[in-house]
Amino acid sequence: MLENKVAIITGSSSGIGLAIAKEFLKQGAYVTICGTNEKKLVNALDELLKESKPEKILKVKADVSKTSDVQNLFQMTYKNFGKIDILVNNAGIAPSKSIEEMTDEDFEQVLSINTFGTFKCTREAVKYMKDKGGSIINTSSFVSLYGSPNQSAYTASKSAINGLTKSNAKELGKYNIRVNAIAPGVVMTDMVKDNCDTETIKRLNMMTPLNRGANPEDLVFAYVYLASDKAQFTTGTIINIDGGLVM
């Protein structure tokens, strides 16, 4: 479904982003993976190379909260592959802290990566997509619609993603750039395990009609669909993939 398309996937050294990269490669895409941790990026690249050719993958260390890093990420991808068709804004952090304990710096850091990072990457993507169109897919979260205690910054950042998705879809449609979002529920990634205790995860699973958390692989085909030409008339939508947690 993605034969010869070129995709940038932020936050793809592990978890959901890495699972997306694996499936995009299987679907025929060329993929740039990026993250801030060089060791994790190298491990991710090694894992991808078990199933794909080296010429189909580019590794770039980038912090999406830094404009210069974002510009370099796109420049290197374009130089290596000659075009950019797909952007997946997946980079994010989700520290768990009560609003009483949260400092200005804590709150700003979450928005800097989750929201400003998405904005900066989207802004940069338009330069490369506006002549031939493209697909931008943002990773939101069920908390943007549901809320969560001790997650005020994360919830605010993901609610902002929903607004960006809809506004950018309306603005960029004239360039045939489609902008959509996926809102996962509880996904068993390292970020969730690091920020949620066992009891919290158990409680969320019990609240989910399917009675379990998702694996990253449960989400990837929604990203494939939105990235593909099969979704050429789909824009401005937010797809909940949360086991029925929000309905």
Image: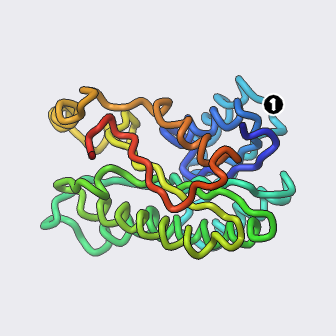
Judged left or right of residue 187, residue 26 is right
Q: Which residue is mark 1?
A: 53
- Tell me: 217 left or right of 24: left
Quadrant of the snapshot with the N terminus = top right
Secondary structure found at label 1: loop
Structure colour scheme: rainbow
Is 151 located above or below residue 33 in the figure? Answer: below
Q: In front: 222, or 17?
A: 222
- Residue drawn at x 70%, y 30% as measured from the top left: 26
Q: Which residue sits at x=24%, y=41%? A: 196
Determine whether 92 is above or below 14 in the image. Answer: below
Which amino acid is tagged 1? Lys
Callout 1 environment at 10 Å: few (<14), some (14 to 19), or many (20+)? few
For residue 105, what is the image quadrant?
bottom left
**Residue 153: percent from left, percent from top:** 29, 64
Who's the residue at 66% across and 53% down the image? Answer: 232
Q: Residue at x 64, y 28 (%)?
A: 47
Residue 115 picture quarter? bottom left
Q: Position of residue 194 (x, y in %)?
A: 31, 41
What is the total number of numbered labels drawn onto the structure image?
1
Q: Where on the picture, by quarter, is residue 103?
A: bottom left
Outermost residue on the front side: it is 233
- The percent coordinates of residue 98 (x first, y second) are 16, 60
| Residue 78 locus on image (x, y percent) | 81, 59
151 or 194, which lies in front? 151
Q: Is residue 85 left or right of residue 215?
A: right
Residue, far top = 50
